[in-house]
Amino acid sequence: MKKMKRLAALLLSAALLTGCAAQGAPKATEAPTATAAPTATAVPDTTKTTGMGFYFDTVVTVTLYGAPEGMMDEIWAACTRYEKLLSKTIAGSDVSRINAANGQTITIDPETWDILRRAKEISSLSGGAFSVTIAPLTAMWDFTGGTNRMPADEERIAALPLVDDSAIVLGDDSTVTLPAGMQIDLGGIAKGYIADKVAELVRGRVFGAILSLGGNVYVVGDKPDGSLNSVGVQDPFSYTGTTLGIVYTKNNSVVTSGTYERGFAGPDGTWYHHILDPKTGLPSTSDLVSATFVMDSSMTADALATACIVMGSEQAMTFVREQGWDALFITRDGKTLASDGFVDKYRYTLLADLMK
Ligand code: ADP
Ligand code: MG
């Protein structure tokens, strides 16, 4: 019966998006009953507000409990600001200016500078599996626009020397210098950064919040009934929104990157997807189709999830164990590999097992 209830709560949440936080129905603020002893502690406001927007090519959903007036608007204003700063397709964004600088040193927003600093660190840690300088190669592919463009071998190979995050020079006073010809693409890290910033914006001002930016979910504070939030991990082999397993957490980010997210089937039926191997410029051919991290930094989790898919299960699992991170990987042949912490701390459970 208890299981059925949990399941009902989970299914209820299936209407939310992939990788999104699944949670039970919130309790509205209740007036004290006649029999309740008078108490000095005020009942916290847990009134639920939800909102949905489209930013960074992604559906963003926000659920707030006990939010002050106007908070939803503040969140959308922040998303608009970050999109204008970090999008590679918006003229005048920091990323567009960096990409057009042609070797010149330019001044960027301190936030963009911070993202680049962290990107360089993760690139170095991952042996280049994560590289924001992948841009000249991502520009040669069209995974989402419908043209299914793929580069010719010569074109692709000629661009490989342009991928090297260590060549991004970050100066004092928020300056950046990128060698001429090189370009950046923050698609593998920006949503994580924005999730962190929106979490920061709401933290301490709401009873609880669930923020979902595509594969990045951030859960802040408590659920109205005090229980942990359950966050669904997308089943890489099923329709978007189909949950494979659940993790339970609070005040944490759960981030999944997957090869199924964006891509196209080529003439020969091969699946060409948006996570490129910086060594080849081709969609990663490792044995991993999905990587999930639970971390308080959604930005780090986002970049690592992308990196680990490129690395493949063996190297990625060694990396994760060495660093003491919590991650879950799903292989092409459907095997699930989880770090010990992922199961122990976050009680990773297959949905199929919950239904038994
Ligand atoms: P999403 O959540 O949008 O599916 P991911 O976090 O999985 O994105 O990152 C994929 C995106 O990152 C790509 O769309 C591209 O913009 C960029 N990218 C692709 N390959 C790499 C790579 N090896 N390193 C860093 N960024 C990458
Ligand atoms: Mg990522």
Image (spheres, helix red, strand yellow):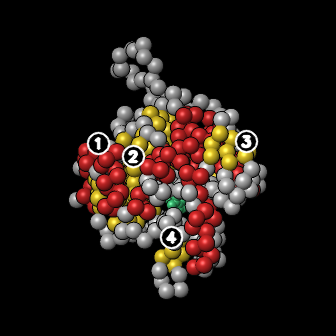
Whether tag 3 and tag 4 are in contact, CB under 8 A, the answer is: no
Estimate the spatial distance between the alpha carbons at disc 2 and disc 3, rounded to whole Å: 33 Å
Label 3 vs 1, first from the N-terminus: 3
| Left or right, 93 with reference to 233 | right
Estimate the spatial distance between the alpha carbons at disc 1 and disc 4, rounded to whole Å: 36 Å
Is the shortest distance between ligand 2 and the CB of mark 2 under 8 Å? Answer: no
Q: Is any atom of residue 6 visible in this view?
A: no
Q: Which residue is mark 1?
A: 345
Please give the label number shown on residue 37. none
Q: Which residue is mark 4?
A: 280
Q: Amino acid at mark 3?
A: Thr
Label 2 vs 3, first from the N-terminus: 3
| Left or right, 160 with reference to 222 | right
Residue at (53%, 81%) from the top-left corner?
266
Q: How many marks?
A: 4
Q: Is any atom of residue 160 visible in this view?
A: yes
Whether tag 1 and tag 2 are in contact, CB under 8 A, the answer is: yes
Q: Amino acid at mark 2?
A: Val
- 32 vs 256, nearest the viewer: 256
